Amino acid sequence: MSTAVDASVPVAEQEDGTANILGGKKVAVVFVLGGPGSGKGTQCSNIVEHFGFTHLSAGELLRSEIKSGSDNGTMIDSIIKEGKIVPSEITVKLLQEAMIKSENDKFLIDGFPRNQENRLSFENVIKISPEFVLFFDCSEEEMVRRLLGRNQGRADDNIETIRKRFRVFEESSLPVVQYYDSKGKVKKINAAKPIPEVFEDVKTIFQPYGPKAA
């Protein structure tokens, strides 16, 4: 699948001189990462409400594409059903389309990049470096407690499945956090605290982006 940027889309110059897909805009992208049950989804909703960011979830975009019944969605569905990982270029293309459609210039990209391949694909196609990575740091024990409480009665609430999700996060996503940390681009949040206290910490980080426009 081609990942080339449509030539009809105006290309803007970032401050670092690289071109991006959102014409004429200085774009703020924040990657949001954290283990399953770390509470990042709740905090993303708060950030959208208070600071006017557009929340993009790679997983939700893939699910939406599948539901659309498009050829692309059928292909994605087949890949997932075969137990394979959706190629980065497909996910990045969906993110690119969603960013262009939103007409916003501030984006929270939730649960992405899931691995180094995702990161490289985003940089090569979207050509925007994140402002920072918002990392929700929480102990595995606390995340297990939350997930078992939240998923009670569901088929995927057993401890083995949850532990596997943690291992995938540690093996694939933590190296992405470490990469950006080496560049001074990680803002770490203690996500074990109660939700209101976590958001107080989040607000401090996002204050420079101003309140949501009325």
Image: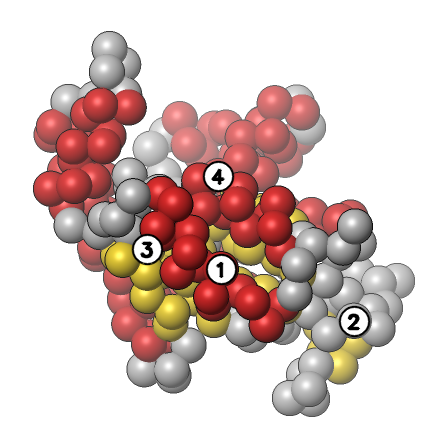
- Residue at the disc numbered 4: 59
Circle 2 or circle 4, nearest the eye:
2
61 relative to 54, above or below? above
Q: From the image, state whether disc 4 or disc 3 is nearer to you.
A: 3
Residue occupied by mark 2: 25
Q: Eyeballing the image, is 107 above or below 10?
A: above
Q: Indicate the amino acid at tag 1.
A: Lys
Decide which of 177, 150 is in the foreground and name it.
Answer: 150
Distance of mark 1 from mark 4, alpha carbons? 25 Å
Tag 4–tag 3 contact (CB < 8 Å)? no
* Mark 3 crowdedness (10 Å alpha carbons): few <14, some 14-19, many ≥20: many
The extreme top residue here reads 153
Q: Secondary structure at mark 2?
A: loop
Name the front one of labels 1 and 3. Answer: 1
Disc number placed over residue 203 in the picture, else none: 1
Is residue 213 shown left or right of residue 130? right
**Amino acid at circle 2:** Lys
> Percent position (x, y) of residue 55?
59, 47
Q: Mark 2 Cα within 10 Å, few/some/many (few <14, many 20+)? A: some
Q: Give whichever of discs 3 and 2 has the lower sequence position.
A: 2
Quarter of image, res 166? top left
Closer to the chain start, of discs 1 and 3, is: 3
Label at residue 136: 3
Where's residue 101, x and y in %? 78, 48
Dot placed on the residue nearer the N-terminal end, 1 or 4: 4
Q: In this rendered view, identify the residue nearer to me: 24 or 149.
A: 149
Q: CA distance from mark 4 to mark 3?
A: 18 Å
